[in-house]
Amino acid sequence: MILAIDIGNTHMVLGCLNEQNEVITQFQLRTDTKKTVHEYAVSISQSLFLEKIPADAFNGAIISSVVPDVKKKIAEVVRILLNTEPLLLGEEVPVDMGIDMNGLTVDDIAGDLIASSVAAKEYYPLPVIIADVGTATTVVVVDQNGNYIGGCILPGPATALSGLVENTALLPAIDFSAPDRVIAKDTINSMRSGIIFGSAGALDGILERFEEEIGKSTILMTGGLGEVIAKYCRHEIIVDRELLLKGLGLIWKYNN
């Protein structure tokens, strides 16, 4: 079994993958730069205990991260708990994918984007557009030849909402449930309408422009709020919540 870990700005996702690269179970922890190695070790150890998975069930681990300080801590946790050296994306770990990015290499691109793209290439018809809706929303493309060719980044729904609330005097914090109608009749539902339908509309606009450049594509959506936003987009979208973890598993296999 492989332990695949993706460390995001807000949360980290840990997945246990079997020999067939299937996600047996996954759990989420809060990303906290103030936590120590041993505090993280306790959290991960307890989570594995609750899932009834012993540490000696793993024969490898792989980590992707957009938070360098936390990546170092989690790598040390893996060494302590699993007694193995984890693969660290972004540190000269090869992947089975071409990169067409104006001279950039795989190490210059966020590991979560690479991992999701590797899985998309393996499991879906090409070309593929992948939208990852999280703290930031990223939309990237794997072309017909299986090459990662770039994409765009925009604020995620939670980030947009946070900016709206923090920079206005009277607007309250809200949840991410959608209103019954776009033209809302009160402040709370007006905010929900703007965040939910606005995020969906922004993605629809980007997807339309992407397909003008690369042609009709498979469209995937993942990330913490991907399932919430996808249902309000007007494109045909496949939600795959395990895409990133499966990509990490494939990269581990490629290197072992």
Image: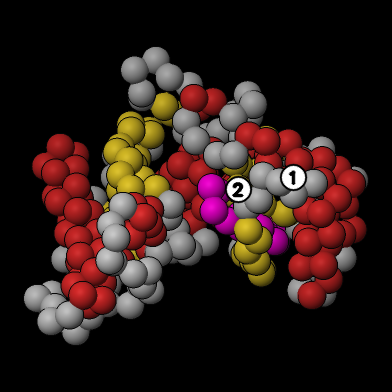
Quarter of the image for residue 83 reads: top right
Instruction: Find the magenta span and give its range.
Output: 8-20
Task: Name which residue lies at 54% across and 25% down.
Answer: 107
Q: In percent of the image, x 76 and y 41: which residue is there?
A: 73
Q: Does the stretch in magenta take in 12?
A: yes
In this view, which residue lies farthest toward the front? 169
> Is any atom of residue 215 visible in this view?
no
Left or right of 11 in this view: 227: left
Q: Position of residue 217 (x, y in %)?
A: 23, 50
42 magenta-colored: no
Q: Which label sits on residue 7? A: 2
Find disc 1 in the rendering and name its residue.
74
Q: What amino acid type is highlighted by mark number 1?
A: Ile
| Among the 4 quarters of the image, the one containing residue 56 | bottom right
What is the number of the mark on residue 189?
none
Q: Position of residue 59 (x, y in %)?
A: 82, 50
Q: How is the image coloured?
A: secondary structure
- Where's the C terminus, which quadrant? top right
> Is 227 above or below relative to 149?
below
Left or right of residue 207, residue 17 in this image: right
Sort mark 2 into few (<14), some (14-19) or many (20+) by Cα contacts within 10 Å.
many
**Quarter where residue 154 is shown:** top left
**Which amino acid type is shown beneath numbered disc 2?**
Ile
Give the answer, above or below, for where 242 lies relative to 76: below
